[in-house]
Image (cartoon, rainbow, N blue to C red):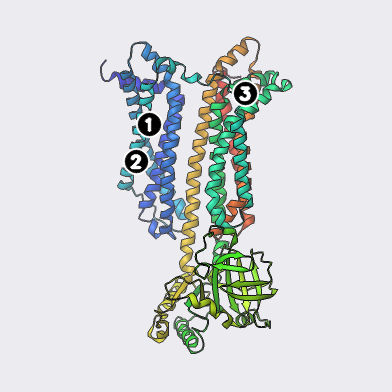
């Protein structure tokens, strides 16, 4: 045979099977386009000029990795379906005298054409849409960007090389499959699984146990840190359980429906149930994949949108003042009297120089310790107890701040009193019920609990349950500092001098003042900050300066959530489309027989609705259940990102589910038409 024969045969085969090749090519083009768009954005010269643009680069890097991994798995799935539909055609060529070598050459040319079309149209589409994506990102970040087009050669090269490797892997897999499969197996490849499967009760029970365990983990987690650690374990359990339940549990469901004579022996149910029971083992995996994709889309959209639209609340929760400076001391006495007055004088000169007056000033000293609560004792790492071997028990983790009574009375305008060894206690999510609290051998009796507390500086937004001790004699805390050595060493309990302020000026002015305050800390006027212990260290923050990081993080994740959701929805649509085509051709002969014995087109439609509705909405329903049980864990993880608006999260989740459900119903109507057209022989009423 002449060489051009095989390329022509490959093109002819693709044209004749356009019903399955067109969606496959669109999938290839879509994944290439999405990957190029994200890669192009990471090279964009305008990204660095956007608010939080540098932070967005991290999100884009994560997105490129997710898309690459997803592309490999999903294109492999699509390629397997494609080859299974073509096997009868290949065996016909084989019967007519074409050897395995000829079949391999056809597959080579088809794979080459798919790769060229996917890469060419994917990159061209990506170039055309990259500017739209850049404008969308700029809008999300509240930034301005030029409308000039920018094509990045490096992004094109990286996309071509990366997806060239993926298409090569797909081709090799197809070649190996054809080479290793016998002609008779090729002919019957579409009908594999026609034997009625047995109900695998072991998988069904195991799926129920795994799903119940994952749900229990999700609803029983108390600490946000515990939720972060166990989240991926719970996700893996849910994925495995979903596949087990759809593969084995759906078979059991079909047999239960079949055993119900009143339900089964109706013409709209008879054909549908008998068809499903034969192929449910194979189609169960497809339904499980649809369910997982639905859940992923709903989780991503609800969490990232609540982060983005609740960003202002998160920023307010994270920063109690526009500017903060917390100096790390070796004891409460390190910054008192003349030294504190000198420091405030230098800061006052900076404010005066810029013509601003600090407002809502917060100034106090406090000690901070973190450890595991054990009865009435806080076990602190680095103390006499040594290393905390059970530090993974996050539910016991507590953060304790110790504040002198004089500072509390001054800031809260109260006149509380305390005796020796006594303390007032204020708690956030700590549920502390003991009558005393001991830290490193120093113990305080709890005189009473407070209901109000001023913001505790940089720890205001901490997700760790916290306890605030108001102590009468601040020197009673001196033994806690004996384990502190140099300023850069680990301190089991550290003392701090906190100063927070508001200015009410522009972001640019606020940043200018903040930078000069930081520099003033090391000025010659404040030589005491460089003492014999190596000098003090300090923590500082500026709301105006760090707001861009929040916008970049939240906006970048929201943008990435939109892109990945679109990609996952497209994958879900393709899986459903392929599923309907596959089942349609499998059921075509059955419905032809039923039409010969009197079944009308109206009866076929009813049977189709019965079959599709029985299983089609199961993934969406289970995805909704997954989402409901995952909600407590998602909420706790979002707390780590300073999200505090619970009502916003609930509202957005409900809206996302309703909108997605409407889209899913429309998809049902469209794919049902495809199925009906196939089983009715291409004619419709």
Residue to which mark 2 is pinned: 162
Residue to which mark 1 is pinned: 170
Residue 500 visible somewhere in the drawing:
no
Nearest-to-viewer mark from 3 and 1: 1
The numbered mark, 3 or 1, whose residue comes first in the sequence reads 1
Q: Which mark is residue 409?
A: none
Q: Residues within 10 Å of mark 1 (few under 14, many from 20)?
A: many
Residue 333, given in percent of the width and then of the height, sits at 51, 84
User: Residue at coordinates 63% horizontally, 47% vertically from top-left?
Assistant: 216
Q: Secondary structure at mark 1?
A: helix
Query: Where 71 falls versus 469 (above or below)?
Result: above
Q: CA distance from mark 3 to mark 2?
A: 42 Å
The quarter of the image holding the C terminus is top right
Residue to which mark 3 is pinned: 608
Q: Residues within 10 Å of mark 2 (few under 14, many from 20)?
A: some
Residue 438 visible somewhere in the drawing:
yes
Direction from residue 352 to residue 459 in the image, left or right: right
The answer to whether the residue labelled 3 contacts the one labelled 1, judged by CB atoms less than 8 Å apart, is no
User: Residue at coordinates 40% horizontally, 43% vertically from top-left?
Assistant: 35
Q: CA distance from mark 3 to mark 1?
A: 34 Å
């Amino acid at each position: 045979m002449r060489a051009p024969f095989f390329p022509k045969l490959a093109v002819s085969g693709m044209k004749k099977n356009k019903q399955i090749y067109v969606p496959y090519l669109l999938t290839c083009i879509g994944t290439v386009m999405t990957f190029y768009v994200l890669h192009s954005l990471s090279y964009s010269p305008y990204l660095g000029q956007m608010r939080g643009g540098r932070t967005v680069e991290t999100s884009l890097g994560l997105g490129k990795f997710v898309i690459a991994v997803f592309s490999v798995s999903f294109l492999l799935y699509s390629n397997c379906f494609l080859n299974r539909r073509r096997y009868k055609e290949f065996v016909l060529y084989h019967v007519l005298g074409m050897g395995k070598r000829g079949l391999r050459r056809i597959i080579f040319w088809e794979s080459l054409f798919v790769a060229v079309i996917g890469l060419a149209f994917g990159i061209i589409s990506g170039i055309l849409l990259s500017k739209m994506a850049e404008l969308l990102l700029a809008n999300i970040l509240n930034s301005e960007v030029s409308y000039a087009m920018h094509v990045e050669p490096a992004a094109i090269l990286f996309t071509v090389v990366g997806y060239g490797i993926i298409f090569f892997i797909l081709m090799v897999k197809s070649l190996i499959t054809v080479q290793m499969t016998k002609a008779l197996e090729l002919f019957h490849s579409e009908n594999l699984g026609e034997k009625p499967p047995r109900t695998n009760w072991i998988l069904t029970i195991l799926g129920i146990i795994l799903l119940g365990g994952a749900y229990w983990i999700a609803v029983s987690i108390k600490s946000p840190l515990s939720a972060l650690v166990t989240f991926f374990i719970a996700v893996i359990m849910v994925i495995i359980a979903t596949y087990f339940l759809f593969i084995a549990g759906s078979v059991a469901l079909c047999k239960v429906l079949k055993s119900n004579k009143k339900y089964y022996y109706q013409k709209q149910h008879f054909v549908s149930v008998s068809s499903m029971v034969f192929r449910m083992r194979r189609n169960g995996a497809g339904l499980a994949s649809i369910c997982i994709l639905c859940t992923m889309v709903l989780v991503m959209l609800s969490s990232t949108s609540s982060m983005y639209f609740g960003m202002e609340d998160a920023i307010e929760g994270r920063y109690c003042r526009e500017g903060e400076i917390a100096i790390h001391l070796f004891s409460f006495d390190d910054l008192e009297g003349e030294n504190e007055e000198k420091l405030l004088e230098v800061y006052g000169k900076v404010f005066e120089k810029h013509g601003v007056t600090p407002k809502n000033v917060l100034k106090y000293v406090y000690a901070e310790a973190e450890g595991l609560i054990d009865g009435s004792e806080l076990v602190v790492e680095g103390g006499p107890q040594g290393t905390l071997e059970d530090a993974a028990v996050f539910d016991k983790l507590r953060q304790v701040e110790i504040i002198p009574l004089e500072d509390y009375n001054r800031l809260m305008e109260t006149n509380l009193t305390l005796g020796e060894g006594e303390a007032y206690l204020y708690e956030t999510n700590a549920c502390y019920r003991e009558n005393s609290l001991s830290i490193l051998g120093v113990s305080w009796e709890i005189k009473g609990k407070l209901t109000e507390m001023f913001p505790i500086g940089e720890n205001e937004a901490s997700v760790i349950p916290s306890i605030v001790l108001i102590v009468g004699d601040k020197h009673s805390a001196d033994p806690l500092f004996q384990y502190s050595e140099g300023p850069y060493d680990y301190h089991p309990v550290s003392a701090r001098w906190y100063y927070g302020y508001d200015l009410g000026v522009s972001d640019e002015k606020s940043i200018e003042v903040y930078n000069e305050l930081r520099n003033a800390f090391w000025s010659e006027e404040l030589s005491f900050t460089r003492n014999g212990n190596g000098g003090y260290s300090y923590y500082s923050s500026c709301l105006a300066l760090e707001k861009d990081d929040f916008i970049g993080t939240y906006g970048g994740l929201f943008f990435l959530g939109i892109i990945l959701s679109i990609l996952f929805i497209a994958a879900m649509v393709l899986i459903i489309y392929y599923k309907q085509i596959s089942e349609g051709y499998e059921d075509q002969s059955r419905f032809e027989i039923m039409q010969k014995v009197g079944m009308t087109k109206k009866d076929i439609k009813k049977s189709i609705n019965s079959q599709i509705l029985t299983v089609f909405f199961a993934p969406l329903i289970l995805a909704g259940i997954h989402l409901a049980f995952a909600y407590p864990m998602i909420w706790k993880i979002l707390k780590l990102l300073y999200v505090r608006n619970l009502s916003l999260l609930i509202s957005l989740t409900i809206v996302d589910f309703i909108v997605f459900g409407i889209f899913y119903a429309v998809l049902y109507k469209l794919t049902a038409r495809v199925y009906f057209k196939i089983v009715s022989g291409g004619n419709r009423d």
